[in-house]
Amino acid sequence: MFSIGEFSKITGLSVKTIRFYHEKELLIPVMVDAGSGYRYYDHANVETAYVIKTLRDLEFPIDQIKLVLQECDNTEGSILTQLQERKNAVKAKIQSQKNVLKAIDQVIAFEKENRKVSQNTTYHIEERELPAMLIGGIRMTGRYSDMGKAFGQLGRKLNRHINGNAMCLYHDGEYKEDDADFEPFFPIKKVVKVDGISVRELPACRVICLRHLGPYERLGVTYEKLFEYVNEKKLKLITPSREVYLKGPGMIFKGNPEKYITEIQLMVESE
Amino acid sequence: MFSIGEFSKITGLSVKTIRFYHEKELLIPVMVDAGSGYRYYDHANVETAYVIKTLRDLEFPIDQIKLVLQECDNTEGSILTQLQERKNAVKAKIQSQKNVLKAIDQVIAFEKENRKVSQNTTYHIEERELPAMLIGGIRMTGRYSDMGKAFGQLGRKLNRHINGNAMCLYHDGEYKEDDADFEPFFPIKKVVKVDGISVRELPACRVICLRHLGPYERLGVTYEKLFEYVNEKKLKLITPSREVYLKGPGMIFKGNPEKYITEIQLMVESE
DNA sequence: TCTTGACTCTCCAGTTGGGGGAGGCTGTAG
DNA sequence: CTACAGCCTCCCCCAACTGGAGAGTCAAGA
C-alpha cells in the first residue's frame, strides 16, 4: 500500500490532482484511515491511474472517463465508440479553430491592404478609362451611415473572391441625406451566387477622378473641385458616380478619419 | 442613450455579458445613474461593443482586448502585431489538437487490431518458415512485468512505422523469474533511427508454433506441448524463441486475460 | 395617486480541471 | 520527546461567462 505521496511519484499525478480525482470518484483509494483520513493506494489503483492519465491525454473530460471506467470490463466494443466520439469532438474543435484562423487572416489582410496606400503625394484631377469589372454589391436606399454594415456583410459573404478596394455607386444625380440610393460593392474575381448580393458586370467607361484626404464629411470640397473642372471643360456627367475607399475605417477600429483616402470617380461621356 | 436592455438588443450581447464587461472595465457605460445604479449607453459604446464582439469572435482573451482598446488610437501598427500573435496562438492550439487526434487514431487502430483475431478455432502445432523481418526493439533484463512499459515506449516512438503485432524475443535458454533476458519489439516498415531503440533485421528461419488462449501465467502448459513435440520429432531448438501477442491487453484497458491469444514460436534447425 | 408589470440592480453560486496556500493533525526517526 | 516531513480539510483563484434570488426602479394605465 502506498501513501498519497508515493502514489503521486509512481503515477506522475500531482497530490492535488489525486485528491481531486478522489473527490470526483474517479480514483478511489483502496483504503482510507478512519482516524487520520490518510488515503492509501494499491496496485489496482496504479493501473486505474494510468488509464485515467491516458484518457486525459486524449482530452477526455472527467465525466466521460468516469463512464468509461464504470463499464470497464462488462463491454468490449464500447471503448471504441467512445474513442470515435472523442475523435469527432476533437475534429470539430479543430475545424472551429481553423475558422477562427481564417477570420484572423482575413482581418490581417484587410488591415494590411488598408495601410499600404501612400499618403505623401498631393492629388490632381485625372481623366482615365476604367476597364469593365465584375462586381458584387447590395443596392440600398437610406442613410450613408448604413453602408458600414453592408460592407461587413459583403466582406463576409464574398470573402476570398474580393478583388480590390471597397467601392460604392451613387445612383442619385443629386446629394441626398436620408433617402439616398446607393450601392456598396466589391470588385470580384468570378461570378458567384450569394444570397442577397447582386453580381453583375460594370461596363468600361471614361471617368474623371480626384482623391480626397480626410473624413467623409468633407468630401463635398473635393466634389466641388471636380464640378468646377467639369464646367470648365464642358464635360457631361453620367450617373452613377463612384467612390473608391482606398483607405477607410479598419475592420476593427475606425482609425483616424483625417487619414482616410477616397477616390471620387465621375463618369463622363466619351469624346 | 440606451438602457442596458436596449443596448443588449442593439449589440447582440446578453445583459449579463454587458454587466460583466463593465465589471472588467472593458465597456464602460457613458453614464451610471447615481441613485438607481442603472447603466446607460450611447453610440460610442455601441462601436466599442462591436469591436469587442469582433475580437471575441477571433478568440482574443478579455485582457488582451482591454490592451487593444487602450492603445486604440495612439498606435497604427500595433493591432497587426496583436493579430499575428493571436494567429500564432490559434495555430499552436490547432497543432496540439491535431496531436491529440493522432494519438486517438493510434489507440483506435490498436484496439481494432487487437479485436480482430478470431477466437473460435482450436489450435494445433504448425511448422513454418518465417521470412526475414525488420524490427525495432528494446533488449532488457529483469522481470517480465516491465515489458508493458517497454511496449508503451516502442508504440510511442515507432508509431506509424509499426508493421505487425507486438512480439518478444527470449534470449535465455531456460525460464527465469527475476533476471530474464528478453527483447520486446515490433516489426517495422523501414529503418528508422530512434533514441533507445535498436533496429535490425531478424533473419528468416524455421519455427514450430502453437497458439495459447488465456492469461500469460498459464503459458507454461502450451510451452510443454511444444517441448513434447520437439522431443518426439527429435528437433533441435535454437535460442532465441519468440512470442507473438496476437491479442493482449489494450492500450487503455487490460481487458479479459482469459481472452488473450499468444503465439509461441520456437526456432528449430532447418532440415 | 396607486398599482402593475417589465426592467434593472447587486450578490451569490456554479461551470472545468485543477493550483496555491493556511492552519492543523499524523507518522516516524533520532 | 521532539523535530520535521507528510498528510488532512477548507478556502480562494484562473476564464468568461450563465443562472437565480431578492430587492429596487421606471413608465403606463386606472
Image (spheres, coloured by chain):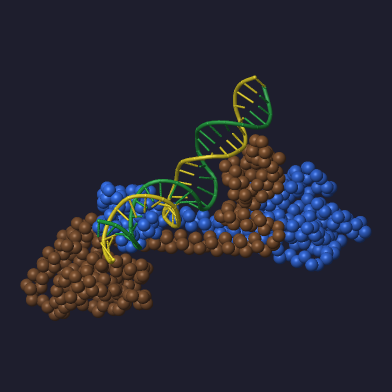
Chain colours: A brown, B blue, C green, D yellow
Question: Does residue A231 appear to the left or right of D17 in the view shown?
Answer: left
Task: Give the x, y percent position of residue B265.
Answer: 80, 58
Residue A98 located left or right of residue A75? left
Outermost residue toward the right? Answer: B232
Question: Is B45 in front, or is A167?
Answer: B45
The quadrant of the picture occupied by the C terminus of chain B is bottom right
Residue B60 shows up from this direction:
yes
Picture residue at 37% right of the left edge, 52% below the top? B20
Q: Which quarter of the figure is the N terminus of chain B placed in?
A: bottom left
Compared to residue B149, the image places residue D8 above or below, namely above
At x 77%, y 65%, the residue is B119
| Residue B81 in view here | no
- Quarter-wise, where is residue A124 in the image? bottom left
Residue in the image at 83% along x and 64% along y: B123
Q: Residue B216: image x %, image y %?
A: 79, 53
Instruction: Give the left or right position of residue A226, taking residue B252 as reference.
Output: left
In the image, taking residue C24 as reference, residue A76 lies left or right, namely: right
Q: Nearer the viewer, residue B245 or A64?
A: A64
Q: Position of residue D4 (x, y in %)?
A: 59, 26
Q: Is residue A153 above or below residue B138?
A: below
Which residue is depicted at the point 58% across and 53% down? A62
Q: Position of residue A238 (x, y in %)?
A: 16, 78
Taking depth in this image into account, of A177 and C26 the one nearest to the observer is C26
